[in-house]
Image: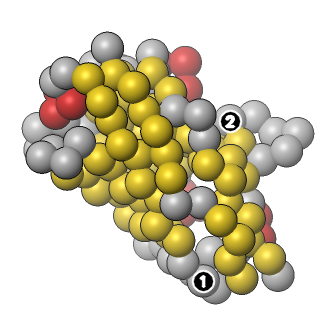
Amino acid sequence: QVQLVESGGGLVQAGGSLRLSCAASGRAFSAYVMGWFRQAPGKEREFVAAISRGSGRTYYADFVKDRFTISRDVDKKTVDLQMNSLKPEDTAVYYCAADFDPGDYWRRGEYDYWGQGTQVTVSS
């Protein structure tokens, strides 16, 4: 089992950057696939990015490619999401997720463990 705590959210102007961090506690952090999802008011929770165990292969939603970067530090048990060139439509609560074998990494139902979320607000 793993517990997840996100941090780093806040208010930023369009074009700015934020770095979100997810701290994991528990065993075998390196064995989990880690993901970031987001949920805007009135919308479904959607996939943002994921990073595999082992090789650290990364996956991104089309709308964040070339703007966001996911990374993990196995020693620190953290997974970060660097967000650049932020847009007002990126405003949402961002959630960290983990699963040993999510299968379809873009499906939120595949992940067993979730953080409480951190708010990101991008002003125009």
Q: Position of residue 114 (x, y in %)?
A: 50, 27
Q: Please, what secondary structure does the residue beneath circle 1 have?
A: loop
Circle 2 SS class: loop
Residue 122: give x, y in percent of width and height. Answer: 73, 71
State the residue at coordinates (71%, 71%).
Answer: 11
Q: Amino acid at mark 2?
A: Arg
The N terminus - image quarter: top left
Residue 58 appears in view = no
Count of marks overlaid on the render: 2
Query: Which residue is the extreme one toward the right?
Result: 42
Note whether 14 is above or below 57 in the view shown: below
Between 123 and 60, which is closer to the camera in this rendering?
123
Residue assigned mark 2? 45
Q: Is residue 89 above or below residue 22?
A: below
Visible residue check, residue 61: yes
Is 33 in front, or is 103?
A: 33
Return the disc, 1 or 2, that comes first in the chain's sequence. 1
Q: Amino acid at mark 1?
A: Gly
**Disc 1 vs disc 2: Cβ atoms closer than 8 Å?**
no
Residue depicted at x 30% and y 30%: 25
Q: Which residue is mark 1?
A: 16
Q: In this orientation, which residue lies closer to the viewer: 39 or 76?
A: 76
Q: CA distance from mark 1 to mark 2?
A: 23 Å
